[in-house]
Image (cartoon, rainbow, N blue to C red):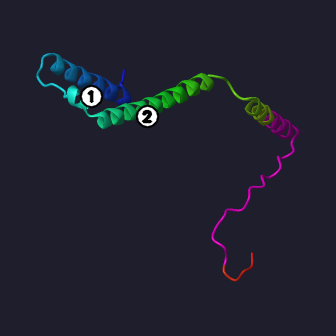
Amino acid sequence: MRIGRAILFWVAVVIALFVVELAELTHLFTLPVQSAFANFISFVFALVFTTILALIGALFLGLYISQRLQGSTSFTPFELEMLKMRSEIGELREELRRAGIPPPARSDPPPAGPPKEGGGP
């Protein structure tokens, strides 16, 4: 079983946050929380920044969940109709082959290239 890069990245992030929490609990280093509360502008900036990141994260999470929910459905009605038409064309070609009539030549468009000089086709 192979572990994806995204999973490894998030495992590393969680481990790093766990190490920071352990360092804070053991007083290996302390974060200057008091100075952030003392300076009102830095507190508001941190609060707004965290709110913006939370909203962006919620947006991406919602997009991911809705895509997963809608992606598990089968073909759309249009796709089903196209598949039905494709099978009908295959049946018609098979009938023509059994009757000895060659199928019509495909009318592919000419390859697009640079325009010819002289103005003519």
Determine crowd level at label 1: few under 14, some 14-19, many 20+ residues with C-alpha closer than 10 A.
Answer: few
- Where residue 48 appears, x then y in whole percent? 40, 34
Front one among 89 and 38: 38
- Where residue 95 appears, x then y in whole percent? 85, 36
Image: 34 above or below 94:
above
Gap between marks 1 and 2, in whole Å? 20 Å
Dividing the picture into quadrants, the one containing residue 66 is top right
Q: Residue at x 31, y 32 (%)?
A: 43
Q: Residue at x 30, y 34 (%)?
A: 40
Q: Which mark is residue 58?
A: none
Q: Is residue 51 left or right of residue 46?
A: right
- Where residue 111 appears, x then y in whole percent? 67, 62
Q: Specify which label sits upstream in the sequence, 1 or 2.
A: 1
Q: Is residue 21 left or right of residue 108?
A: left
Name the mark nearer the viewer: 1 or 2: 1
Quarter holding the C terminus? bottom right
Q: Residue at x 36, y 25 (%)?
A: 7
- Where residue 33 appears, x then y in whole percent? 22, 26
Dividing the picture into quadrants, the one containing residue 36 is top left
Dividing the picture into quadrants, the one containing residue 38 is top left
Q: Is residue 76 left or right of residue 36?
A: right
Q: Which mark is residue 52?
A: 2
Front one among 60 and 68: 60
The answer to whether residue 60 is magenta is no
Q: Which mark is residue 37?
A: 1
Residue type indicated by callout 1: Phe
Tell me the SS state at disc 1: helix
Residue type indicated by callout 2: Ile
Q: Are marks 1 and 2 in contact (CB under 8 Å)?
A: no
Q: Which residues are magenta?
A: 88-116
